[in-house]
Amino acid sequence: MGAFLDKPKTEKYNERGSGNGLRYGLASMQGWRVEMEDAHCAVTALPGDLKDWSFYAVFDGHAGARVSAHCATNLLECIMQTEDFKKSLGENDGPSATDAIKQGIRRGFLNLDENMRDLPEVATGEDKSGSTAVCALITPQTIYIANCGDSRAIICRDGKPAFSTRDHKPIMPDEKERIQNAGGSVMIQRVNGSLAVSRALGDYEYKNVEGKGPCEQLVSPEPEIFVETREDSQDEFLVLACDGVWDVMTNEDLCSFVSSRMSLTDDLEVIANQVIDTCLYKGSRDNMSIVIVACPAAPKVSPKALAQEEELEAQLEKQITELVEQNDGITFQQLIRNMHDLDIPNLPPGGGLSAKRNFVEEVFKKLCPDRADSMAMGDDAGAMNFLRTMMPRAGELAAAAIASEIAMDDDEAAENQ
């Protein structure tokens, strides 16, 4: 669950598609982890009379990939088969239909979690895996977002994050209270000192407290559901991603980065790959998966932005050339560290120099073909020292997110008094 490779696996899986006025691109990468435990789902048009509805989801598995893979294949069907969801189809748009859809999503999560107990390897105790889940059900008027765990969804409007799900961490007051009421504890910000999320599908060893319902266990399968009205003139894009991305990028970082890349290309697969690479170079050590869904108001390719990017790359090539000429025998890792000390204007917002590392590699390889071996991200001193300089950023982001959510809970409690 916590083991790492000597070198990251950087091969990516990609998908793209379009439908209902939306375009999507996704990327996933194993990275430094020993196994790839992420899964995803993208359905541009639901079956039957729901062809103008779409569904996207990301699942971040842990302790194995069995549960995440099963969720990716079965969650949508479980939601659509609930009586509440079927009832919503007979309702006119309005509060009653919205409530029925929300209840259908909730019941779909709970049914899926209960059904997976019967999987042979789960029933025998051979498989103890679990998975977070974040999904978006998009109708012509509404975006329903459900989150269970610490994967996250954001909506970008007018160049800024306008919505974000809440990470379910054991340290959160409401989550901690449930855990303790079920006889558990929160140690080192983990359930019983082990599991880093307080809600998940699977993880049945944390769901066996007698006298407690499924949503009262140490780990709950209950999703938190959000309803956002679509604003076609303002909605730019939706992002669903696992914590391997959010560990090193804030909501603002990712929104700015994706928006800026959309002004350079309309290929969402390319942008998703750039996000994954940037997160790897920022120090993420986890599996990474991201789905980017572009709405009609998404930024368009801009000649001005293309010209600025060309100027940036010309400036970077000049600086790399100067550093190589001034430092005989410089390795790639030394070059990267030196460049981090430079004041380089107009780097990609939210990505910084990490977002241009592939370009830096290309230039270095051209200038120093005999030193290409020094570019590999391996378990050597140079690479690890570089990663150590990046890792505090991930800790800062996690601490900031937890503090923000605790403050939000405190504000809500004060309002209710």
Image: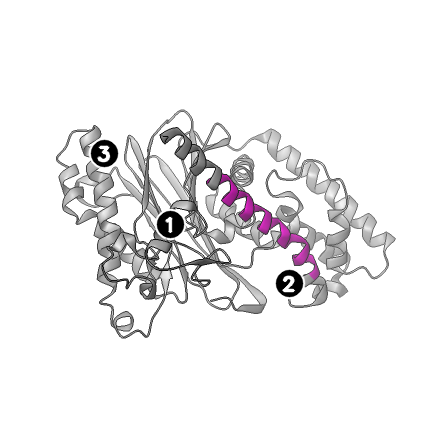
Judged from the image, the secondary structure of the residue bearing numbered disc 3 is helix
Q: Which residue is mark 3?
A: 98
Q: Which residue is mark 1?
A: 177
Q: Is residue 44 above or below residue 387?
A: above
Q: Which residue is mark 2?
A: 377
Q: Nearer the viewer, mark 3 or mark 1?
A: 1
Where in the figure is residue 190, as x and y percent of width and height?
46, 58
Marks 2 and 3, the one that precedes in the sequence: 3
Residue 394 magenta-highlighted: yes
Kindly report the distance in space between the C-alpha atoms of the residues bearing marks 3 and 1.
29 Å
Q: Is residue 94 left or right of residue 268?
A: left
**Residue drawn 59% across and 40% down?**
350
The tally of labels here is: 3
Q: Is residue 205 above or below residue 22?
A: below
Where in the figure is residue 343, as x and y percent of width and height?
76, 40
Where in the figure is residue 90, as x and y percent of width and height?
12, 35
Q: Is residue 33 left or right of residue 24?
A: right
The type of residue carrying mark 1 is Glu
Quadrant that contains the C terminus: top left
What secondary structure predominates along the stretch shown in magenta?
helix
